[in-house]
Image (spheres, rainbow, N blue to C red):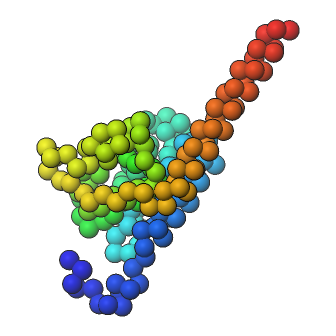
Amino acid sequence: MKSSNSPLSVAAQFSDEYWMEAALARAATAQSLGEVPVGAVVVANNQIIGEGWNTPIRDHDPSAHAEMQAIRMAARHQQNYRLVGATLYVTLEPCPMCAGAIVHARLDRVVYGATDLKTGAAGSAMQLLNHAQLNHQPAITAGILHSQCSQVVSAFFAQRRAQIKAAKKARKAHGAD
Ligand SMILES: [Zn+2]
């Protein structure tokens, strides 16, 4: 498929790390909104055609995961619900819902950073992205900028646990009055 590319345009292709940095920037946006910091971009022909970050709490929408937003935007951009030839970069391993959307969209590749042992559907908790029963299996690359991607999520949950603990303590102290 790359045979039509001149050597120059191949040399100008950005790396997986480059696009994962772009996804991390979207994760920071989610974090600034108080959402679980996950970010995603869809890349085709060496450019971003879709971007997304988690907004389920803000939008009262359980489907508002970073991947879903990025896929929706990319499909609108392409005027096509099939994203053949495109790659999704996401900071955290996709959940079963997003894995379903990835298969429906026929994305060529999925590249993710951190693994999600609880709900990861690219092999950590279950394997949906490469399920033999499904009619499309994207190529998967895991662990790009792994430590940065994991750090963002684990720092967020550590902070949230600390906040909950502090709130509990404050309520207890208040109740003791
Ligand atoms: Zn998801």
Q: Residue at x 26, y 67 (%)?
A: 85
Quarter of the figure that contains the C terminus: top right
Q: Hey, which quadrant is residue 33 in on the image?
A: top right
Q: Is residue 13 left or right of residue 106?
A: right
The answer to whether 54 appears left or right of 125 in the picture is right
Name the residue located 30 percent from the left edge and 61 percent from the top edge. 109
Determine the image quadrant of residue 46: bottom left
On the picture, is 177 further left or further right than 90?
right
Q: Position of residue 125 (x, y in %)?
A: 34, 38
Q: 128 or 143: nearer the eye? A: 143
Q: Is residue 169 visible?
A: yes
Residue 111 in the image, given as x and y percentages of width and height: 37, 59
Residue placed furthest toward the right: 177
Which residue is drawn at the image coordinates 41% and 36% (left, top)? 118
Q: In this view of the protein, which residue sits in the foreground, 119 or 35?
A: 119
Q: Measured along the vertical axis of the image, is residue 145 above or below residue 170?
A: below
